[in-house]
Amino acid sequence: RKLFIKNMAKLGIIIGSIIILHSAYSMIEHRKFQNEDFVDSVPLDIIVEVLLGMLINMVSGAFFFNDYMPIQEASILSKISYSEVHANTDLRPLNKTRTGLLKKYRKIATVKDLAKDNSRVNKLLKKVA
Amino acid sequence: MDPKRRIKKEEVIRTSKEAEMFNDALVAKAKVLGFITGGMVAGTLGLEGVQGFIFYFITHIICSACICFSLNFTAMPFFKDLSAIMTGNIFTNLLSYLLFWVMFYNLIYVL
């Protein structure tokens, strides 16, 4: 369904830009028939066409860039494994301890989560076991 | 959850900054497209001077309204507040709007 909306939005952007370019060309042709003494205002049909193209383009653009991510941490944490939570070293704070971070994210590591991770902790657990 | 229970300071909805930045970037991309079309329309209609800059603010309002419409006028779970879309990054796309406005005006009315 998302792919369908995105493809329709792409089509809408193309159609909207074609409409605007067509109206610009028709305005150029309209000005060729104008005398220098008498300058006519923009015709109503061109105004309508241009505004229609603008609307189509903007709505299609809004729907094309619609792949937003949920910002709540709970929804993100439910989709990633325990090891991926602290995987990004760039975002890891330097002054916070490991236990503090674990409390903050409130995700308790199970034995299964640790078994997937080939870290030093896992090797220690295996030794203990 | 008991409604009479007081909400403590620690119990705040935590949001991911990566996701917020990603969503803001998507909104900015949609606005760039909107302002480019707005510039083309302003040039085609032959707007001059202050009229063009007033039309810039009109395109900003229409573009923000279209983005809110695509979100079904509800901020969660993608944004904290919808007003950030309306009030954020007002003048960032001014130069791209100006480029297409001047280009189309010159193509139609000067050349």
Image (spheres, coloured by chain):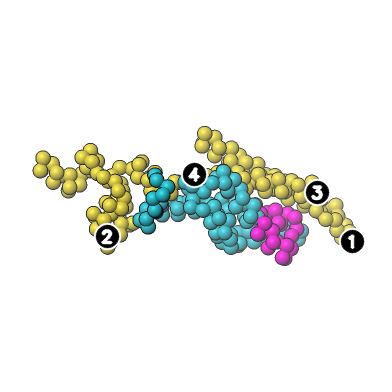
**Local secondary structure at mark 3:** helix
Labels 3 and 4 positioned on one and the same chain:
yes
Instruction: Give the Cα distance between marks 2 and 1.
Output: 76 Å
Residue marked by disc 2: A96
Residue marked by disc 4: A67
Discs 2/1, front: 2
Say if A28 sits above or below A81 in the image.
below
Q: Colour of chain B?
A: cyan
Q: Earlier in the sequence, mark 3 or mark 1?
A: 1
Q: Using a 10 Å C-alpha cutoff, classify the residue at mark 4 as few (fewer than 14 neighbours), some (14 to 19) or many (20 or more).
A: few
Q: Nearer the viewer, residue A54 or A37?
A: A54
Say if A47 sits above or below A95 in the image.
above
Give me the residue at 58% from left, 61% from top. Answer: B90
Identify residue type, mark 3: Leu
Chain of the residue under label 4? A
Q: Which mark is residue A44?
A: 3
Residue A97: x %, y % from top left: 24, 58
Labels 3 and 1 positioned on one and the same chain:
yes
Discs 1/4, front: 4
